Amino acid sequence: MPKNFFASPKGMKDILPEEEGFWKKIYQSVEKIAKDYDFHFIETPILEKKEIFLKGVGEESELVSKQMYSLTTKGKEKLVLRPEGTAPICRAYIENGMSSLPQPVKLYYYGPFFRYERPQRAREREFHQFGFEVLGAKDPFYDALVVLVFTDILKSLKLKDFIVKINSIGCRKCRKKYLRALKKYYQPYLKNLCSDCQKRFEVNPLRLLDCKEEKCSLYKKGVPIILDFLCKDCKRHFKLVLEFLDYLSLPYYLDHTLVRGLDYYTNTVFEIFLGGEEEEEFSKLSLGGGGRYNELIKFLGGENVAGVGFGAGIERIIEAMKIKGVKIKVNPKDLFLIALGGEAKKEILAVWREIKKAGFKAAEAIEKESISAQLRAASKLNVKLALILGQREAAEKTILIKDMESGIQEEIPQNKLIKELKKRIEK
């Protein structure tokens, strides 16, 4: 690596060609399953107004207080690089009058997001997510639907070993009683908690359950169980969600300390982790999660419209696929094109255009001047056939077909090439 070069900013990485297959496979799976379950694509701006997250996510949340990339325009407008997907989707729902559409409105998205935090395993400062949101839906049917969609996507990516953790954090009414009990439990241990949790105790005690510090995790075992504090409606809602999951034979684990990290959640919350033989080692690898947000659209100035959804980390899913040994074929080639000399290079472009129309995929290394160097490049790609054009073949409108396995080559007229390829390569 040269001494004087420009590196990418800390926590922001290039997506390189060797991972192309993983990214394409995930996008294809997301799009197919979105279509199967009647979700429609939406894309929001990468820049959003800061107020959306102050009101929607919560000023005291770690995301807002520590992790947002903020900027102020010349016109004194405060903007941020979007740190998550749900609040912008709700803003778009309000701004574009989607409440007048048949409800619920079912949307999906994917793209880059940004959080200023310590770069960690499969989560850089720029990361990518896909997500599904159902807006205008109170029925617990839709809580189960988004879990089903997420798990179907994972299965389509050959990730069948996963753990669904689920909980209910109730509504604001019943949560008040729980927060009092939670503070009462933590009060004797307050001095032993990390500095962040000492602050959370005062401003947002529910976030105590979301702390990943080892010394704080020790006290989670004895915390009051939030399900014991749910009101009648919240208990009924969560019971029905679990009944749907049971009916679908979707295994889940009740985790009464699961609360998620964003303040807009109500009722159902869930998170999906990598499981299987590697469960113990990789149980902290969260693939994504979500839940219900019945008050978010109202907080952002819209009507009292309920919603539920999830977001999934693409980099984390790619890591999980690698851990599980999932193999992805990247754009396999049928042919390798070889040209020697100026006229042959012109002719090979015309040939490439014709074979493309016929559905054949080709690679080349025309920059290499010798036929031996180009053939070595062909061997590395494991293609079945090489098409060779020299100056004579270009002038006579012929072409050499070389079988890369046997080494046998045959010269044919160019106007018979497509017919010959169809005989030799099954499409």
Image (spheres, rainbow, N blue to C red):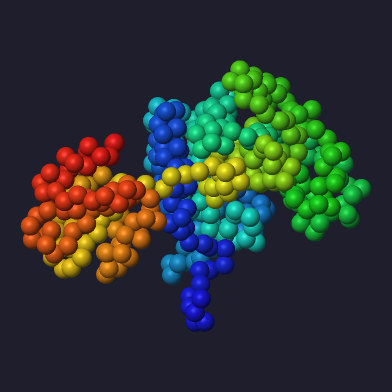
Tally the numbered discs.
0
Q: Residue at x 79, y 50 (%)?
A: 201
Q: Nearer the viewer, residue 279 or 297?
A: 279
379 lies left or right of 256: left
In this rendering, does residue 193 appear at all? yes
Q: Position of residue 247 (x, y in %)?
A: 61, 17
Identify the residue at the far right of this view. 188
134 lies left or right of 40: right
Which quarter of the figure is the C terminus placed in? top left
Q: Position of residue 149 (x, y in %)?
A: 52, 31
357 lies left or right of 166: left
Q: Nearer the viewer, residue 327 or 148?
A: 327
In this rendering, does residue 171 appear at all? no
Asked if residue 287 is positioned above or below residue 387 in the image, the reply reads: above
Quarter where residue 178 is shown: top right
Identify the residue at the far left of this view. 396
Q: Residue at x 61, y 46 (%)?
A: 323
Q: Residue at x 67, y 36 (%)?
A: 276
Q: Nearer the viewer, residue 222 or 350?
A: 350
Asked if residue 130 is positioned above or below residue 77 in the image, the reply reads: above
Q: Position of residue 38 (x, y in %)?
A: 41, 29
Quarter where residue 312 is shown: top right
Q: Residue at x 76, y 29 (%)?
A: 227
Q: Nearer the viewer, residue 277 or 383?
A: 383
Q: Position of residue 85 (x, y in %)?
A: 51, 46
